[in-house]
Image: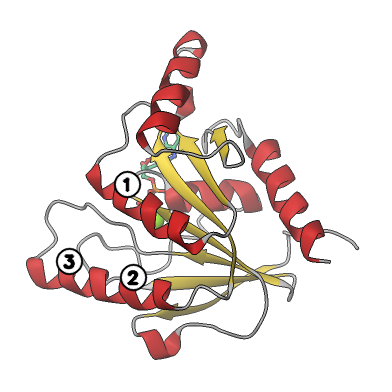
Amino acid sequence: MEFINLHKAEFILSAARPDQFVKDGRPQFVFAGRSNVGKSSVINKILNRRNFARVGETPGKTAHVNYFLLDSAAYFVDLPGYGYARVSQTEKQRWAALMENFFADTSGITQSFLIVDARHTPNADDKIMAEYFQQTCVPFSVIANKADKLKPRELPERLEDIRRTLVLDERDGLFAFSAQTGQGRDDVLARLRAVWEGLQ
Ligand SMILES: Nc1nc2c(ncn2[C@@H]2O[C@H](COP(=O)(O)OP(=O)(O)O)[C@@H](O)[C@H]2O)c(=O)[nH]1
Ligand SMILES: [Mg+2]
């Protein structure tokens, strides 16, 4: 089975309500991360696109789940960013309700990726998000983005800290990544490919 042609990516929809969630049986690769961690940049880098995954992106505005269809075969699902300081209480509650609903039915999720900042210890919000994913029991990987901002010798310790803080399993992938340089892109692609082939 050929791997998904990532050049054939199209934005499908922005779901603001649970009844808009896509459930059509195609595998879904889900991405989550704190606002500004570089989630859109990571998705763009994986797909080798510019300004692709930036739909509906005003910080503090209504949270959406964005769906990108790849090669008519699978989805990248971009969950709304969290932890943005200036978001109102109402918006925070909306985010929580939307996520609650999203994770109420995880049958469509094939693999999840949590994007964190390689430079920092994951915070309470990251831990909550990791727990959401870990409870689904689907393959889970962490992408430690902005690795270009670290010295190479700092990286092993940072990764170990992230692994420990998020209580990652041996099987969980942890990838140092840079949306700027493309570092780690091949590792994430290998992971996607392995999961994809496991489905065939
Ligand atoms: N140096 C560096 N900057 C990055 C990287 N990824 C994202 N950024 C920058 O971080 C900011 C937020 O990125 P964006 O993709 O919009 O984050 P999002 O809110 O998580 O979708 C932008 O200024 C990006 O250029 C990275 O790997 N390295
Ligand atoms: Mg974004």
What residue lies at 33% left-to-right and 58% top-to-bottom?
81
* Gap between marks 1 and 2 measured at Cα: 14 Å
Q: Nearer the viewer, mark 3 or mark 2?
A: 2
CB contact under 8 Å: marks 1 and 2: no
Secondary structure of residue under mark 1: helix
The alpha-carbon separation of the residues under discs 3 and 2 comes to 11 Å
- Mark 2, residue position: 99
Q: Residues within 10 Å of mark 3 (few under 14, many from 20)?
A: some
Q: Is residue 113 above or below residue 200?
A: above
For the N terminus, the image quarter is bottom right
Of the four image quadrants, the one with ligand 1 is top left
Q: Quadrant of the C terminus?
A: bottom right
Residue under the point 56% across and 34% down: 175
Which residue is drawn at the image coordinates 9% and 65% (left, top)? 88
What residue sits right under mark 1 in the picture? 126
Q: Amino acid at mark 1?
A: Asp
Residue at image mark 3? 92
Q: Is 8 on the left or on the right of 33, as rendered?
A: right
Q: Is residue 173 visible?
A: yes
Element class at badge 3? helix
Q: Amino acid at mark 2?
A: Met
Q: Toward the viewer: 36 or 49?
A: 36
* Percent position of residue 102, x then y: 40, 75
**Label 3 to label 1, Cα distance in Å?**
15 Å
- The residue drawn where x is 50% and y is 73% is 106
Please provide percent x and percent y for residue 53: 49, 60
Asked whether residue 5 appears in the rendered view, the answer is no
| Mark found first going from the N terminus, 1 or 2 | 2
* Sequence-first disc among 3 and 1: 3
Q: Is residue 52 above or below residue 107?
A: above
User: Dot 2: within a 10 Å radius of its alpha carbon, few (fewer than 14), some, or many (20 or more) residues?
Assistant: some
